[in-house]
Image (cartoon, rainbow, N blue to C red):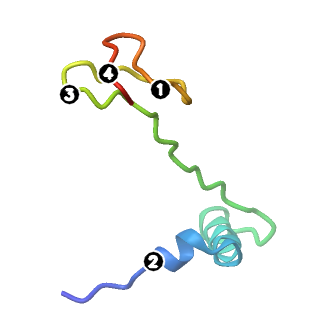
Amino acid sequence: MDGFDLTKYQKDEEEKDKIKKIMGKVLSGRSDYEAIIEEKKEIPRCSNGNCNWALEGGEKFCPECGTKC
């Protein structure tokens, strides 16, 4: 099955703005409404499979198990 590739709309800022305006109009029926697109932020975690401790960022070693990150 061939699909329509939407990755260019996710990465290009100009295309994101177009999609926001289109979705806002579809969802609200008004042309001045703009949808909000949330982006998920990945939480850095310890590379040790048993620990999986959530890191704040910038640590060289895991504060829980001591594994090098």
Mark 4 vs 1, N-terminal side: 1
**Could you say which quadrant of the image residue 30 lies in?**
bottom right
For disc 1, the marked residue is 60
Of residue 57 and residue 37, the one placed in the foreground of this image is 57
Q: In the image as oriented, which residue stretches furthest toward the top?
A: 64
Q: Secondary structure at mark 3?
A: loop
Q: Given this view, does label 2 or label 1 mark the residue nearer the observer?
A: 1
Identity of the residue drawn at 64% across and 71% down:
16
Q: x, y percentage for residue 24?
A: 67, 65
Give the residue type at disc 2: Leu
Q: Given this view, does label 1 or label 3 mark the residue nearer the observer?
A: 1
CA–CA distance between discs 2 and 1?
37 Å
Mark 3 vs 4, N-terminal side: 3
For disc 3, the marked residue is 49
Q: Quadrant of the N terminus?
A: bottom left
Q: Secondary structure at mark 1?
A: loop
The dot on residue 6 is 2
* Mark 1 surroundings: few (<14), some (14-19) or many (≥20) residues within 10 A: few
Do tag 4 and tag 2 residues touch (Cβ < 8 Å)?
A: no
Do tag 2 and tag 1 residues touch (Cβ < 8 Å)?
A: no
Do tag 4 and tag 1 residues touch (Cβ < 8 Å)?
A: no
Q: In the image as oriented, which residue stretches furthest toward the bottom?
A: 2
Identity of the residue drawn at 39% across and 30% down:
69
CA–CA distance between discs 4 and 2?
38 Å
Give the residue type at disc 4: Thr
For disc 4, the marked residue is 67
Residue 25 vs 43, above or below: the answer is: below
CA–CA distance between discs 4 and 1?
9 Å
Give the residue type at disc 1: Lys
Q: x, y percentage for residue 22?
A: 64, 74
Identity of the residue drawn at 20% across and 27% down:
49
